[in-house]
Amino acid sequence: MTTNRREFLKIAGVSTLSLIAPAIVCPAWAKDKIIPVSNSPEALSPSKALTAKRWAMAIDASKCPADCVDCIAACHATHNVPGFGNPKDEVKWIWQEKFAAAFPNESHAYLRESLQKQQLPVLCNHCANPPCVRVCPTKATFQRHDGIVMMDYHRCIGCRLCMAACPYGARSMNYRDPRPFIARINPDYPTRTKGVVEKCNFCQERLAKGLGPACVVACKEKALVFGDMENPQSEIRLLLEKRFNLLRRASLGTKPQIYYIL
Amino acid sequence: MLEKSLKGSRGYWIWIIFLLIVAAIGFFFYLRQLDYGLGVTGMSRDVSWGLYIAQFTFLVGIAASAVMLVLPYYLHDYKAFGKITVLGEFLAVAAVIMCVLFVFVDLGQPSRVMNVLLHPSPTSILFWDMIVLSGYLLINIFTGWVILTCNRKEVPPPGWVKPLIYLSIPWAISIHTVTAFIYAGLPGRSFWLTAIMAPRFLASAFASGPALLIIFCLILKRYGRFDAGEKAIQALSKIVAYALATSIFFVLVELFTAFYSQIPEQAQHFLYLFTGLEGHTKLVPWMWTSAVLAFAALGMLIIPPIRRNDGWLAVACVFVFVSLWIEKGLGLVVTGFIPSPLETITEYVPTGAEIAITLGVWAIGFMILTILYRIFITVHDEKENP
């Protein structure tokens, strides 16, 4: 009897250990520290991928022709952004706002009229100090080493704290199933499910293939310039050197990376 | 002890069945929300939190009722509260369960809720809120249940409950503080970006929680053959009076900063609340109701003869409850989004489905509370009339 019991306890002990060992060796919180494939240097820079230390965009809206929405159409088609046709459920990654809405603190009644009437493209600012990343309870929104603030649509629980935290209104919630409202599904980019938040991703999926962001490529007037802020010789840095530019709500300390040339 | 909840008068069962029906209707609409998405609610891209998060915020305050009894009784040996501390703890249990349910029904992807534990994010205040709320729930279930069991057996509570009870005091403060921090740390939401948010939460909590507790004590006195005692109720009403005065003071302080500084970002949200912005006035009647009720209740509570009359006291407590439900609920949550950071004014009106789900959660909360109070009353009865 004694041996039997001893044997039983041994087997029970070993089985229990073998069950919990994986959790001890690699607990859930440690898994987060393993660099995900998409964030590893190899995945970010396969031979032809576009890479940077900090991606940023400059927008010279004075070049934008009236009623031109090429950048918006290109972005939304590329990323399977649904068109619900009502402001309540609306999902948008890049859209237009008046100067007074984009720059409430810089706006006043006697600004030159062209500027007051100007429609500016607005999008996620890919802040260097992003409040949305800070508040996310699941790390579903995160910041890559090259500055891109991204969403993991499979991890997002849809609490919308990031929407409250974003001072630019850049985030959209899928209040209903978006798939029936996508005009033409682009198979190269995932569609989303209801109940998750989404936003501009600086076309990381195109950068990985060596392509520039869809909005930048679509702009015939070259009003959008995309580049590496940490490279003093990059086109964007040389441009910002020459032209007066503003950041949206810079006083909030979010360090936005969309530079508006005015 | 749970079996004691199975015995009750006809009224008790009618009440339970009524709550079950309301909860079932809420559940039906929740299934619809699960199927369709959060689009069944009135929430939008601009106003991304609504009735659910408003109830959550308000109910975190109700959970405070416990500490306003526990603190005087255990730290200052204020004996009058001895009889009813368990009532406070049970109210806290029901309130925290409702809080958790309201956050849950607000999630776009509820099946992924465990991601909060699988990928803990210490920089997220919501993560910490989950920790403090679940901790507070456990502490109150434990202490309430153990103390009631000991009361029944007429033995003193075991030694290990005391430290847990002491812990519940700072813990109650923490649930309000952390919930306030969800709002108060967001750049670009000037309405919430104020250091007084946490103190305001505490003040309104210590008014609304005990006010609700007084209402329950008065109901139990009339229909439940349980008298909390004149002294306990009067002491509670003084707590409500002081807390309400502090709460009103804190709001006035906010109004001063907003309107004397004349910084548009500060003032526009309060203007939306009390006058409306560019013709958008949906919350204005609600806020004025809240303001009038708050001052009326304060007047009634600080005049001793009115406060000492059970009927008037009940009216005053209902005023406090309704006033703070508006102010700390929709008034606080929705106004943070109006106007939006892009100066757009999108108003919010809850939909029928949203209201049904909200009522359903309240019904579940009241059911838990009724059952716990039923047990408490039966234990008490058996002791008084063996």
Image (cartoon, rainbow, N blue to C red):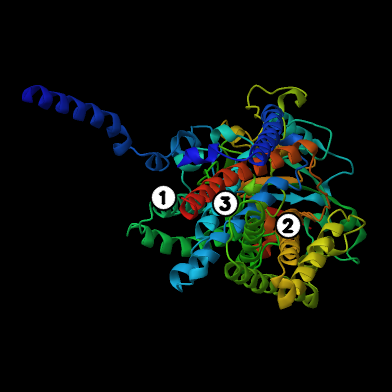
Chain assignment, label 2: B
> Which residue is denoted by mark 2 in the rendering?
B336
Image position, residue A40 (x, y; %): 44, 38
Q: Give the amino acid type for the residue marked by disc 3 in the picture.
A: Val
Q: Residue at x 79, y 65 (%)?
A: B293
Nearer-the-camera pick, B187 or B317? B317
Nearer-the-camera pick, B259 or B320? B320
Classify mark 2: helix, strand or loop: loop
Q: Give the amino acid type for the residue marked by disc 1 in the picture.
A: Thr
Q: Residue at x 72, y 40 (%)?
A: A93
Label 3, residues with CA under 10 Å away: few <14, some 14-19, many ≥20: many
As displayed, is residue A257 above or below residue A10?
A: below
Classify mark 1: helix, strand or loop: helix
> Which residue is denoted by mark 3 in the rendering?
A135
Mark nearest the camera among 3 and 2 is 2
Q: Residue at x 76, y 67 (%)?
A: B294
Mark-to-mark CA distance, 1 and 2: 45 Å
Residue B274: tell me if it is visible: yes
As displayed, is residue B23 above or below residue A108?
A: above
Chain assignment, label 1: B
Q: Is residue B52 left or right of residue B68?
A: right
> Which residue is denoted by mark 1 in the rendering?
B149
Q: Is residue A185 left or right of residue B373?
A: right
Outermost residue toward the front?
B386
Q: Residue A217 occupies which quadrant of the picture?
A: top right
Q: Are marks 1 and 2 on the same chain?
A: yes
Chain assignment, label 3: A
Label 1, residues with CA under 10 Å away: few <14, some 14-19, many ≥20: some
Mark seen at residue B118: none
